[in-house]
Image (cartoon, helix red, strand yellow):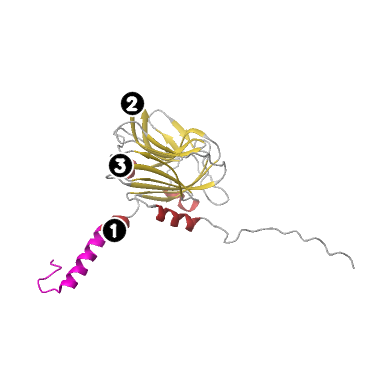
């Protein structure tokens, strides 16, 4: 099909070329996420939980007693190129040395591959390999146990960046392309699990999203604003002394 004829006016040709270029630049952002899952009772039929599923009063899956959810590893293997993003809404109830929120990774001696959105002790972290050791962006401050957080992790082919509640808290230089495991590896929600290690999460993973696109800080802030309720005016209490008797 020929979009531009030789008789098309110059300004019309310019507008058409501009539209085509704009569509080309933005097409990747329209792609559907590789993974977009709510860990709730309403979606329990989609969850390949490894223990009997229990849900809290808000219908969120309870992660305790070594509960975790297994995903199809083909989802993680479909990551292409140098760009991806992870979004998660989580609550951690107890610290763990190598906790996993979403992981597809092997860490076995000199063989380190894949990616992990998780936590080390009581600090959130985002780690990935570009062929060597896992490179980590680790939050400088500890999270509060039992508190819900919105996490975003992005990789642009150069920098691994971690956001907590819409704020950039850590980054690490990681030039190259992500190196995924080439041996059987679990793709896990709510645990770090490789061929010989297992560190389950205690708490909640309310939602998780994996995208083959790069979220920019403005997009992240916008998504956080949608999901967090904030008072326009902070509530306050005033104490009024009783009136003096006349």
Q: Mark 2 = which residue? A: 110
In the image, taking residue 212 as reference, residue 246 lies left or right, namely: right
User: According to the image, label 3 marks what residue?
Assistant: 77
Q: What label sits on residue 42 in the rendered view?
A: none
Residue 51, magenta (yes or no): no
Measuring from the top left, give residue 28's x and y in whole percent.
29, 55
- Of labels 1 and 3, earlier in sequence is 1
Within 10 angstroms of label 1, few (less than 14), some, or many (20 or more) residues?
Answer: few
Q: Is residue 14 magenta?
A: yes
Kindly identify the residue that appears in the image at 9 percent across and 71 percent down.
Answer: 6
Instruction: Write the start and end of the magenta stretch as one range.
Output: 1-24
Q: Position of residue 64 (x, y in %)?
A: 53, 38
How far across and how far down the image is residue 245, in percent? 89, 65
Residue 41 against residue 192 in the figure, above or below = below
Position in image of residue 142 (x %, y %): 53, 39
- Residue density around tag 3, few if under 14, some if 14–19, many if 20 or more, within 10 Å: some
Circles 2 and 1, Cβ within 8 Å, touching? The answer is no
Q: Nearer the viewer, residue 144 or 158?
A: 158
Quadrant occupied by the C terminus: bottom right
| Disc 3 versus disc 2: nearer the observer | 2
Q: Residue furthest right?
A: 246
Q: Is residue 134 left or right of residue 66?
A: left
Tag 1 residue: 26
Q: Residues within 10 Å of mark 2 (few under 14, many from 20)?
A: few
């Amino acid at each position: 099909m020929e979009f531009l004829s030789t008789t098309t006016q110059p300004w019309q040709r310019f507008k058409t070329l501009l539209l085509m270029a704009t569509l080309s630049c933005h097409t990747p952002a329209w792609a559907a996420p590789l993974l977009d899952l709510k860990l709730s009772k309403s979606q329990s039929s989609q969850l390949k939980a490894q223990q009997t599923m229990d849900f809290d009063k808000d219908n969120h899956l309870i992660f305790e007693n070594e509960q975790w959810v297994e995903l199809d590893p083909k989802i993680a293997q479909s990551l292409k190129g140098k760009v991806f993003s992870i979004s998660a809404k989580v609550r951690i109830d107890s610290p763990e040395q190598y906790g996993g929120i979403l992981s597809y990774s092997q860490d076995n001696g000199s063989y380190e591959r894949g990616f992990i959105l998780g936590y080390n002790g009581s600090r959130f972290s985002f780690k990935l390999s570009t062929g060597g050791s896992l490179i980590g962006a680790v939050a400088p401050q500890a999270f509060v146990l039992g508190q819900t957080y919105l996490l975003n992790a992005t990789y642009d082919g150069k920098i691994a960046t971690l956001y907590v509640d819409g704020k950039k808290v850590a980054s690490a230089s990681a030039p190259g392309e992500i190196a995924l495991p080439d041996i059987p590896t679990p793709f896990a929600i709510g645990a770090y699990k490789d061929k010989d290690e297992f560190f389950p999460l205690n708490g909640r993973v309310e939602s998780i999203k994996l995208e083959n696109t790069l979220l920019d800080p403005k997009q992240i802030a916008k998504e956080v604003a949608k999901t967090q309720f904030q008072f326009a005016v902070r509530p306050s209490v005033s104490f009024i002394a009783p009136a003096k008797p006349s």
